[in-house]
Amino acid sequence: MSRHCERSPWMKTNLGESRRGPGSKQEQRASERRRATISHHSCGARGGGGRHRNTSLPLFHPGDAVPESGIYEVIHDADHRQAHDAVMIMGNRFPSCETCNERVRFRIIRTAPYIFQDQDFEEQP
C-alpha cells in the first residue's frame, strides 16, 4: 500500500472481513488491527521534510458528526487563520469557529483511537 490515503477506516472499503460475528470482541480487535495498519500509512505523517495532505478526501462542516477519532486538518476562511491540526473524537460534532463561523472545514489526516473508547481501557459498568 502506498503512503497516500487511498484507504481510510471511516471510508466504506473492504479491508478483509473476519469470519467472526460483527459484534464479537474478536471482530472488534481485528477491526482495530486493520485500523492501526491503515493509520500507520495515513496522510500527514511527519518526516522527510514536509507533509503531504490528500486534498481529495472529503471535507466536513460544522455540525457534522465526527466519523473517526483522530487528527484533522482545520481549514479556516481564507483571511482568518492558516490551516492547523486538531484532535477530534468520534461521536462529537465538528464545531464552528468563533471568527469564521460556519466557513471552517475539517479534513482527516490520521485516525487514532481515543483511549477511553478502546475496549481495553473502557470503564466497566
Image (cartoon, grey):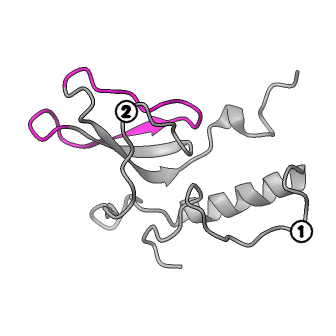
Q: Quadrant of residue 57?
A: bottom left
Q: Which mark is residue 19?
A: 1
Q: Quadrant of the C terminus?
A: top right
**What secondary structure is the magenta-colored segment mainly?**
loop
Image position of 5 (left or right of 80):
right
Frontmost of labels 2 and 1 is 2
Image position of 62 (left or right of 9):
left
Q: Residues within 10 Å of mark 1 (few under 14, many from 20)?
A: few
Q: Position of residue 79 (x, y in %)?
A: 8, 36
Q: Is residue 78 magenta?
A: yes
* Residue that extends furthest to the bottom in the rendered view of this protein: 1
The magenta segment is: 77-99
Q: Which residue is mark 2?
A: 62
Q: Which mark is residue 57?
A: none
Give the residue drawn at x 72%, y 60%.
Answer: 33
Q: Residues within 10 Å of mark 2 (few under 14, many from 20)?
A: some
Element type at marker 1? loop
Q: Position of residue 105 (x, y in %)?
A: 31, 41
